[in-house]
Amino acid sequence: MTALTITAGAYSFAARLETELAPATCAAFRKAMPFESKIVHVRWSGEGVWIPLGDLDFGVGPENATSYPAPGEVVLYPGGVSETEILLAYGPVCFASKAGQLAGNHFLTLTSELENLQALGKATLWEGAQPIRFELAS
């Protein structure tokens, strides 16, 4: 198991890479760390925040894909029908875009501070984009 720290807005979460379920996605994301961006609230998917990544290519295809990530699960959509993106569910989600339902690679799961997910989601919805950083745990 590879442990990560995710700092998003005013919150910090421990997480693990799902290396057995999504080995290629985890390896590609690990090469990109530390990974910094901003999260914005989802448009069509429900209670989630996302990182729009345009045409960024992680070099992976579908792997351990789901349209229904649970709160605390992070998925990577590697592009195709819609742009490349990372989504973090904080409540009920049906992952979608303007082109319709999508399935993203579940590659990361938050393991602590889950009680702060709703607050992060609401802050993103009402206050706007929040900084996010993924890094290997020390």
Image (cartoon, rainbow, N blue to C red):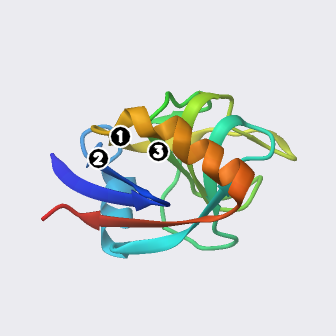
- Residue 37 position in % (x across, y down): 53, 72
Report if the CB atoms under discs 2 and 3 are less than 8 Å apart.
yes
Report if the CB atoms under discs 1 and 2 are less than 8 Å apart.
yes
Q: Which element is circle 3 on?
A: strand
Q: Which element is circle 2 on?
A: strand
**Residue at image location 71% in from the left, 49% down from the top:** 125
Quadrant for the N terminus in the image: top left
Left or right: where 111 falls relative to 51: left
Disc 2 residue type (three-letter): Ala
Residue furthest to the right in view is: 98
Q: Which residue position is annotated with label 1? A: 109
Left or right: where 63 falls relative to 125: left
Mark 1 vs mark 2, CA separation in Å: 5 Å
- Relative to 106, say whether 53 is above or below: below
Q: Which residue position is annotated with label 2? A: 15
Can residue 63 be seen at all in this image of the molecule?
no
Which numbered circle lies on residue 74?
3
Mark 1 vs mark 3, CA separation in Å: 6 Å
Q: Which element is circle 1 on?
A: strand
- Residue 25 position in % (x across, y down): 40, 55
Disc 3 residue type (three-letter): Val
**Residue at image location 62% in from the left, 38% down from the top:** 103
Which numbered circle lies on residue 16?
none
Report if the CB atoms under discs 1 and 3 are less than 8 Å apart.
yes
